[in-house]
Image: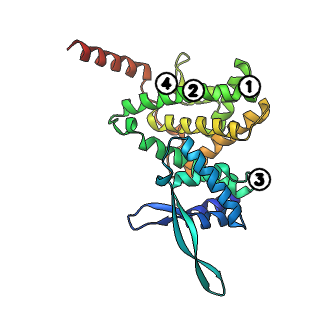
């Protein structure tokens, strides 16, 4: 990560606040300054777009955007009450997606909020929270990844990644970003898998989650920025993979290539199907 990216990430962490219940939030006025909006009125337009995106995603605005009045310094140590908004992490994520992409701090803000927001979304899923075993989590995340890989393929096709050879190259760019330069073949060899074994089928829940973040964020970036051309799409996939890797490093977690190779998920699927069949016959 560059010094500039570290600086921007530090800013977002520094302006985070904690309310009386111990929950984190960000002040809209602090966020406007961090994103280099000199006129708060212009930033309010971004908040409006973010609220629309929140509604379109099926979320309640009240859970993520809360109006309040805060004391703001206006110079000469004088303060006055001004309207602001308490923003959840998800609200900040939506704001980042709708802010001016030409600002470097906005681009790096996407890195800061995107992956951790996706982690929070998964943790908040009722279906995921009901899972108690590693096998159950792997099955859930593998299905989610299959769904989003299909969506990513569709979006990549619109960007110019047309045939299967192009798509294989496109996928490898994402892997190289996430796995520190390794493509699918290199990951396969590093994990000690046999020729017939697929790398996705031998990922544990943590590694599957990292790849899910990579897929969803690439899909969104390709659509949001209307990226066109194979080379630009490939580079975008690489950049997103690399940013997910940076976030994993920042969190002090194990790099995906160093996570243990898991049992073939096909075996787990067969066990689950047998269990369901046995339950039906009882």
Q: Earlier in the sequence, mark 4 or mark 3?
A: 3
Tell whether label 1 touches label 3 (CB within 8 Å).
Answer: no
Q: Position of residue 198 (x, y in %)?
A: 53, 21
Q: Residues within 10 Å of mark 2 (few under 14, many from 20)?
A: some
> Closer to the observer: label 2 or label 1?
1
Report the residue marked by disc 2. Answer: 188
Q: Position of residue 100 (x, y in %)?
A: 73, 53
Number of numbered discs on residues:
4
Cα separation, mark 1 vs mark 4, equals: 24 Å
Cα separation, mark 4 vs mark 2, equals: 11 Å
Report the residue marked by disc 4. Answer: 201
Q: Residues within 10 Å of mark 1 (few under 14, many from 20)?
A: many
Residue 177 found in image quarter: top right
**125 up-or-down from 149: above or below:** below
Please name the residue shown 54% across and 41% down the image. Answer: 57
Q: Earlier in the sequence, mark 3 or mark 1?
A: 3
Cα separation, mark 2 vs mark 3, equals: 38 Å
Report the residue marked by disc 1. Answer: 161
């Amino acid at each position: 990560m560059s010094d500039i990216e570290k600086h921007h990430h530090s800013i977002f962490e520094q302006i985070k606040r904690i309310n009386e219940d111990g929950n984190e939030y960000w002040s809209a006025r602090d966020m406007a300054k961090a994103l280099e909006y000199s006129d708060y009125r212009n930033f309010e337009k971004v908040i409006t777009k973010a609220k629309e995106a929140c509604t379109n995603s099926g979320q309640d605005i009240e859970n993520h955007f809360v109006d309040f009045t805060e004391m703001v310094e206006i110079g000469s140590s004088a303060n006055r009450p001004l309207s602001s908004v308490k923003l959840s992490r998800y609200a900040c994520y939506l704001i980042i997606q709708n802010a001016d992409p030409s600002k470097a701090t906005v681009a790096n803000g996407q890195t800061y909020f995107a992956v951790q927001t996706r982690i929070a979304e998964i943790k908040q899923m009722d279906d995921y929270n009901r899972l108690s075993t590693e096998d159950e989590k792997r099955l859930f995340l593998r299905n989610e990844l299959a769904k989003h890989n299909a969506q990513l393929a569709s979006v990549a096709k619109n960007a110019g990644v047309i045939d299967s050879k192009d798509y294989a190259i496109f996928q490898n760019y994402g892997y190289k970003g996430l796995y520190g330069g390794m493509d699918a073949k290199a990951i396969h060899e590093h994990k000690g898998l046999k020729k017939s074994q697929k790398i996705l089928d031998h990922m544990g829940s943590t590694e599957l989650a990292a790849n899910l973040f990579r897929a969803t964020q690439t899909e969104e970036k390709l659509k949001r920025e209307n990226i066109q051309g194979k080379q630009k799409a490939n580079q975008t996939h690489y950049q997103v993979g690399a940013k997910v890797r940076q976030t994993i490093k920042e969190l002090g977690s194990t790099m995906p290539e160093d996570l243990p190779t898991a049992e073939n998920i096909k075996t787990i699927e067969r066990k689950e199907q047998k269990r369901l069949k046995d339950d039906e016959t009882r």
